[in-house]
Image: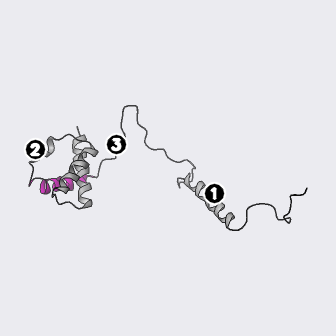
Amino acid sequence: MNLSHRSGRGSGVRGPGALLLALLLSATLLAGCDGDGDGVTPRPEETTPGEEATAPAPPEETLAEGEELVNERCTPCHSLDRVYAEDKDREGWTSTVDRMISLGAELDARERQVVIDYLTERSESP
């Protein structure tokens, strides 16, 4: 029984299936590429056991803006001593700032993030 029913042009996928296969193969190859040509994809920062990965510190000007926003937007209802007495991680400050916004604190999305970054950095600093 002769299963070779194609002409001498070789075997393979043709038509829309060939395009789909080519796109999937290309996407797979590109997913492993980091773009610098060495073929090595960088790994996320490694931590030692018991150590949590932390985000890089915000730039100095962001911290200064965060301090200013806390002074302007938080002190109408709280003393700075009360704000700074809290010892929270990023998740804790995010929850607190979101709760304060729901109660009327006026922060847009960018200002919210600046305040969270500032309070988190201040809490994590020695």
Numbered mark located on residue 81 in the image: 2
Q: Which mark is residue 54?
A: 3
Look at the image and tell me in which quarter the C terminus lies: top left
Query: Can you identify the residue that label 1 sits on?
Result: 25
Point 37% across, 40% down: residue? 53
Q: What residue is rendered at 14% in x and 41% in y?
A: 85
Position of residue 38 relative to residue 110, above or below, is: above
Query: In the image, 39: left or right of 95?
Result: right
The correct choice, above or below, for 41 with respect to 18 in the image is above
Q: Residues within 10 Å of mark 1 (few under 14, many from 20)?
A: few
Between residues 75 and 45, which one lies in front from this camera angle? 75
Q: CA distance from mark 2 to mark 1?
A: 58 Å
> Which residue shows up at 28% across the image and 45% down it?
91
Q: Residue 4 location in percent, x, y?
A: 86, 60
Q: Are marks 2 and 1 in contact (CB under 8 Å)?
A: no
Q: Which residues are magenta?
A: 56-77
Please tell me whether residue 75 belongs to the stretch shown in magenta.
yes
Q: Residue at x 58, y 50 (%)?
A: 39
Report the side of 74 relative to 115 (left or right).
left
Mark 3 crowd level (few <14, some 14–19, many ≥20, 10 Å Cα): few
Q: CA distance from mark 2 to mark 3?
A: 26 Å
**In the image, what residue type sits under mark 1?**
Leu
For discs 1 and 3, the disc positioned in front in the rendered view: 1
Dot 2 falls on a residue whose secondary structure is: helix
* Amino acid at dot 3: Thr
Q: Nearer the viewer, residue 89 or 35?
A: 89
Q: Residue furthest top?
A: 49
Ranked by sequence position, the earlier of labels 1 and 3 is 1
Q: Nearer the viewer, residue 66 or 106?
A: 106
| Residues packed near mark 2 inside 10 Å, few (<14), some (14 to 19) or many (20 plus) | few
Is tag 2's residue or tag 3's residue first in the polypeptide sequence? 3
State yes or no: discs 1 and 3 in contact (Cβ < 8 Å).
no
